[in-house]
Image: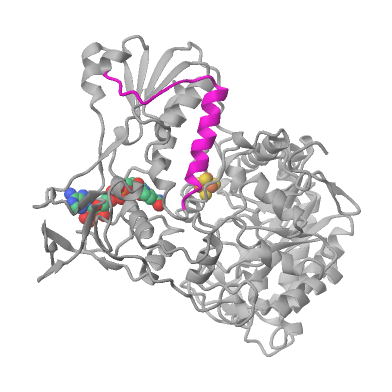
Amino acid sequence: MNTPYPHLLAPLDLGFTTLRNRVLMGSMHTGLEDIGNAHERLAAFYGARAKGGVGLIVTGGFAPNQDSIVMRGASILDNEAEAEKHRVITNAVHEHGGKICVQILHTGRYAYTKQPVAPSAIKAPINPATPREMTEADIAQTIADFAQCAAMVRHAGYDGVEIMGSEGYLINEFVAPRTNHRTDRWGGSFENRIRFGLEVVRAVRERVGREFIVIFRVSMLDLVDDGSTWDEVVGFAKALEKAGVDIINTGIGWHEARIPTIMTAVPRAAFTSVTRRLMGEVKIPLITSNRINDPQVAEDIIARGDADMVSMARPFLADADFVAKAAAGRADAINTCIACNQACLDHIFSMQLASCLVNPFACHEFDVTVEPASAPKRVAVVGAGPAGLAAATLLAERGHRVTLFDEATEIGGQFNYAKRIPGKEEFGETLRYFGTRLKELDVDVRLGRRVAAGDLAGFEHVVVATGVVPRTPPIPGIDHPKVVGYVDAITGRKPVGTKVALIGAGGIGFDVAELLTHADAGGDLATYRKEWGIDFGYTGNRGGLADPQMAAPPREVWLLQRKPTKLGEGLAKTTGWARRLLLQKRGVHMLGGCQYLCIDDAGLHLRVGDDERVLDVDTVVICAGQEPRRELVAGLEAAGTPFTLVGGADVAAELDAKRAIFQATEFAVEF
Ligand code: NAP
Ligand code: SF4
C-alpha cells in the first residue's frame, strides 16, 4: 500500500465483515445525546468522522435500563421505537463507508442517581450515594437488559456493540475484589467474579447472532487498590473470547483512580505496553488506547505488534478528517488533540455540550456551517497568538484577503510559553497546524514587525488580537533584581535560583511551579510512571499500583495567592486535581491568604493571617495575571478604521486559549 502508514491503514478482517482500517474512534459522551434533535446532531457528528475515513466508530454510552444511566435524563436504548430514531445515525455513517457500534454502558455505583446499584453496597469515593447490592433477580434482569439493548442496537442498523467492562463501571465492579464482596455465585472466586461479564456477553451474542461485532472493553490496568491481577486480566480475556467476543478493547484506570491517564502530561501511547502483554494470549484482535493522537505514533504501535487496532477518541473532536489527512500523506495538516480536556471532558462534567479547544466546530456540525464571505474584504489581523491564528485562518478560508502581523518572529503568542512546560509540549502541535493552514490559505504573514494604527490604513477591517501584558503587582521592592516575570522564567531568559516564591497561583503559577520542580527521572514515560506510582508489569500489587518514587525536585518552591481559598480551585475540573496532587508530591508549599509586604535582599516578606514571615528565596517569579494589550485601539478609533477585539486584548481576566479561540472563531464565521 502506498501510504506512510501501511499498518494503520490496512483493513482488518473479522471473518464476517472487514473494517477498512485499524482506526477506532473511541467512545465519548458529547452531550449531543441529551439535547433537542439529538439523533440528527449525532448523525452529522458521526457522519463527518466516517466521511473523514475512520474505520470503526463507537458511540458514547447508551444505558440498557433505568438503573444504568449516568444521571437523570440520560439516554436509554431498550425499545424499537427508540431504535428507529437511530437510523439516521447509522445511515449517515454507512453512506460514507464507515461502521459504527453502540457502547452499552451500565454505570453501576458511578450512577449519579438516588439509588445506584452495584455488586456490593460499597460507596464509590466519587459518588455521594451508596449503592444498593443487586439481588439475584436484579442480576438476571440486568443481563437480559444488556441483551435487549444489543438487539435494539442491531435493529437500528448499527454494525455492533461495545460492552463497557472497564473504568470502574458495573461489570468491572463485579470483576474486582475491591467492589465485589459477595459470597454467592457472583462473588468470591475469580470464576464467580467474572461470571456476570461473561453472562452479559453470552446473552448479547445469543440475541444479535454471530455476524454482529461484539467488542468488550476490559480493564487491563485498574490503577486502584484491590483491582485485578494480570493473570486475572488474561483469564478474563480468554473467557470472553470463548463466550463470543470479536474484539477486546483496552480500558485503563477507574474513574476514581488518583492517577491521570489521559491528560496532556501523560506521555503519548503510555499504556500500549499493557495491551501488548495480552497479544498472543487470545486470537481475537486487540485495541489499545489512551493518549494516542498522531498517525505515526499509531502506525508504530501496530507495526511493533503492541495491538491490532488503535483507539483514539478526542483526536476526532479535534479533527474529523484525521484519517483522510494521514492517508493523503498530509499529517502536517492534522489539527492535533492536545489532551487539555478543556472543551470536551471539562464541558461534560459541567453539564455543557462538548466541543474542542482547537476545533470549536466539533459537535456543531448540525447547526454551524462555514459559508464563503458574501463580500470579501481586506482584513489585517494583528497578533498571531491563538485568537489571531483562529481568526486569520477562518477569515481566509471564507475568502477574505488576510494579512497577519506579529512583532514576534514566530507565531503562537502565549502558546509558545505553554509548550515549554514539561508535559505540555503538545501545544506546539497546534502551532504546527496553524502554520500549515496559513500556508494553505495563502495568508500574508508578516512577523517580526510591530505595527501601529497608521500602518493599517489600507485595510477595511482590523482584528485586534494583540493579547495580554503580564500584570506587575504594586509590591514594594518589585524592581528588586531577584524579581523575574513568568515569561523570563519559562523561556530561561533570566536565571531562577533554587529557592523560589511564585506570586500568583492561577494556570500560569501552576505551570511555572511544574516547570521549576520538574526532575527528569529517565525520560517522559519513566518520570510519569515513577511520580504517579504505576506498575505497568504488575510485579506487585493488584490493580497495577506501585509506590510513587519522587526524584528530588531541583528547587524548593512556594506557590502563593492572596485569596484564602484552596490553591488551584479555579483550575480545570478534570485536570486540576492531578496538577495540585503532583505539586504536593513534589513538596511545593502552597499558601493562600497571603499579603505581600515587600521584596528585598532577605527575600519575600509576607503576612498570612496574623503571622508575618520572610521567605528567604533567591527568586520571586510574578505570575499575577495579565492586562489586555490594546495600544492600537486609540489610533484605529482616531483613523476611523473598523476593528474587532478578540482574545486577551478584549478581556484578559482569566483569559484562556479556549475562550480566545472560540471568540475569534465566532467572529470569523459571521464576518
Ligand atoms: P489567573 O488565572 O488570572 O491567575 C492570576 C493569579 O495572580 C491569581 O492567583 C491571583 O490570585 C493572582 N493575582 C491577581 N492579581 C494580583 C495582584 N495584583 N497581585 C498579586 N497577585 C495577583 O492568570 P494566569 O495564571 O496568568 O493565567 C491566565 C489564564 O491562562 C488563566 O485563565 C488560566 O486558566 C489560563 N491558563 C490555563 C492553563 C491550564 O493549564 N489550563 C495554564 C496556564 C494558563 P489572588 O488574586 O488570590 O492573589
Ligand atoms: Fe483534545 Fe483539548 Fe480538544 Fe478535548 S478540548 S479534544 S482534549 S484538544
User: Is 328 placed left or right of 400 in the picture?
Assistant: right
User: Is 657 placed left or right of 315 in the picture?
Assistant: left
Q: Residue at x 84, y 62 (%)?
A: 207
Q: Is residue 507 above or below residue 430?
A: below
Q: How is the image coloured?
A: one colour
Residue 400 versus residue 502: which sits nearer the camera? 502
Q: Position of residue 166 (x, y in %)?
A: 65, 67
Q: Is residue 267 above or below residue 220?
A: above
Quick check: is 493 in the magenta stretch? no
Residue 374 versus residue 230: which sits nearer the camera? 230
Specify the quadrant of the image occupied by residue 501: bottom left
User: Is 185 placed left or right of 226 in the picture?
Assistant: right
Q: Position of residue 361 (x, y in %)?
A: 54, 35
Specify the quadrant of the image occupied by residue 67: bottom right
Q: Is residue 641 above or below residue 440?
A: above
Q: Residue at x 55, y 49 (%)?
A: 31
Q: Is residue 487 visible?
A: yes
Image quadrant for the N terminus?
top right
Q: Position of residue 434 (x, y in %)?
A: 51, 32
Q: Which residues are magenta?
A: 424-452
Q: Is residue 650 visible?
A: no
Q: Residue at x 42, y 12 (%)?
A: 378
Q: Residue at x 12, y 64 (%)?
A: 602
